Image (cartoon, rainbow, N blue to C red):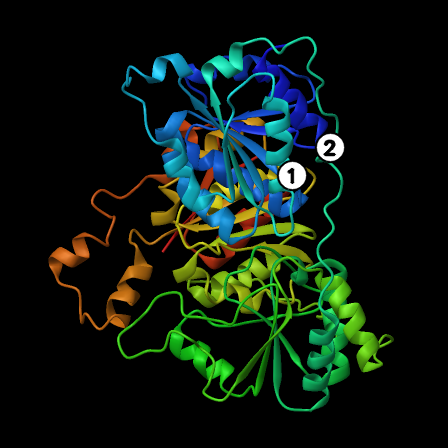
Amino acid sequence: MNGAESLVETLVDNGVDICFANPGTSEMHFLAALENPRMRSVLCLFEGVATGAADGWYRMKDKPASTLLHLGPGLANGLANIHNAKRASSGMVNIIGEHSTSHLKYDPPLTSDIEGLARPLSHWVRRADSSDTIAWDTVQAVEQASQHPGKIATLILPGDTSWREVSAQVELPKRVAAQPKVPKAPDAARIAHIARVLQSGEPTLIILANKATRGLALERAGKIAAATGARLGSQFFTARIERGAGRVPIERIPYAVGQATEFLKGFKHIITVETREPVAFFSYPDKPSLLKAEGTLVHTLVEADEDSALAFEILLDELGAAHAKPVLQQRVEVVVPQGALNPLSIAHALSAAIPENCIVVDESLTTGRESMGHTMGAKPHDLINNLGGSIGYATPVATGAALACPDRRVFCMVGDGSAMYTIQSLWTQARENLNVTTIIFANNSYAILKAEYANMGAGVPGARALSMIDIDRPSIDWQAMAKSMGVPSVSVDTAEAFHKAMADSVRTPGPVLIQVRL
């Protein structure tokens, strides 16, 4: 067994059984080791697709995937979606190929400071110096990635470590890192303080994030809201929310600063759960960075590394509300809209079309802002957003989510500007026959930037500024793009055609692209 085979064997022994790969020459021995029948290998044609897909896998499976990237430039290509994954508290194990140790002294063209590239966006970085110890390095990488919250682990694999044989006397670790990671217990005094805040009767917003927006934690948060009159909210972007009919509803803090401050001004208390107090996504002239009103008090109930479900259980006991009944979202039947496409008709078409147990990946800021409020009463589904803000996340994340949950349809909503960053995702979706409906809102513009131009006080964009925002010369042929990568497509320009295209895609296995012409 060589070092690469030892690495892959240890990954699968410890629960990491998928690798999103974009390999190069230095990784050929690792590529050979991926023949391990317990490891699923998924080829991605761009490193940002690989890292984004690993993020999507974690968000749906709550366990890390691995990636295989080629040297420093390959890592650099994947960093934007590693940034998004880190912000979403997703765990992943990145394997970065490197020149053999003896070759590095000659400074070959692809030599770079891989550690320097990795550290700002990794929680743990290590260079594997020996084939004899690489299995133990791998165990530590998986342990780091499997923490709560999830972490980014980067393991650098020199070529000679990969191809050298493991000494016969070396004992390989078995299932060391695969043990479930139990989050920290919350502080009892902090919970008692929150109980007093809630019992005060003063207007209170509980902001939920990460694991608190789903499962038992969300159900218990709903009980607390029902018992105390507190409202439940989330930041505008969240890693994953269970929502729709039959779920505990969560209000979304608006994205725009003015709307967000208006939403928050009525609360005397803000209680944070696995998140921090809300801040503006960007700074603007004459607008605040902190969105809370003056005099609003912020209290932490659950830190990022603590157990939300347990905290809510203890808090319910403190309140004497263990038997409270949460208010659940009722199903809202929406009439399929007719006529022109606009944010409202798009939202209603989406609400009517979302199938039960769908996964909705949203990167449609300009067109989709209306959608989330109008899909609260849709069939139960999961919503995934981009916490990191680096565009080009949606189609890779949708790819990873579809691999994690092959029995569920994924709706991926993305603007045309964002889609161009990682459109290679379509090829992987076709190759793996993934149930992804990619919805591209084609307004031939980075439309969000037109609004931001005004928000920044820059006035009305002139011809040169507009030329840096519009992407209509030439217009992108999305159907031709989809066809070139093996994905069937349809183009729509009315609300009823949009709904029909979504409904048709649910009935047909495999990927499809819908171009929404705006």
Q: Position of residue 318 (x, y in %)?
A: 81, 79
| In-front residue for pair 137/20 | 137
Q: Is any atom of residue 479 visible in this view?
A: no
Q: Quadrant of residue 170?
A: top right
User: What number is the disc on residue 143?
Assistant: 1
> Quarter holding the N terminus?
top right
Q: Amino acid at mark 1?
A: Glu
Neighbour tally class for label 2: few under 14, some 14-19, many 20 plus, Cα within 10 Å: some
Q: Which mark is residue 229?
A: none
Q: Nearer the viewer, residue 205 or 360?
A: 205
Q: Helix, strand or loop at disc 1?
A: helix
Rendered residue at 65%/27% (across/down): 11
Q: Residue drawn 69% across and 51% down?
A: 357
Residue 299 screen position, x and y as percent:
60, 77
Task: Identify which residue is drawn at 57% across, 65% down.
Answer: 275
Residue lying at the far bottom of the rendered structure: 201
Dot 2: element: loop
Left or right: 15, with 277 as reference point: right
Give whichever of discs 2 and 1 has the lower sequence position.
1
Q: Which amino acid type is shown beneath numbered disc 2? A: Val
Q: Where in the figure is residue 470, as x and y percent of width and height?
A: 23, 53
Q: Which mark is residue 176?
A: 2
Q: Compared to 267, does 56 lie above or below?
A: above
Tell me whether the residue at label 2 lies in contact with that at label 1, contact meaning CB atoms closer than 8 angstroms: yes
Taking the spot 36% from the left edge, 13% from the top edge, the residue there is 103
Circle 1: is it few (<14), some (14-19), or many (20+) Cα within 10 Å?
A: many
Q: Quadrant of the C terminus?
A: bottom left
93 lies above or below 121: above
- The residues tagged by marks 2 and 1 sit, at their Cα atoms, a distance apart of 8 Å
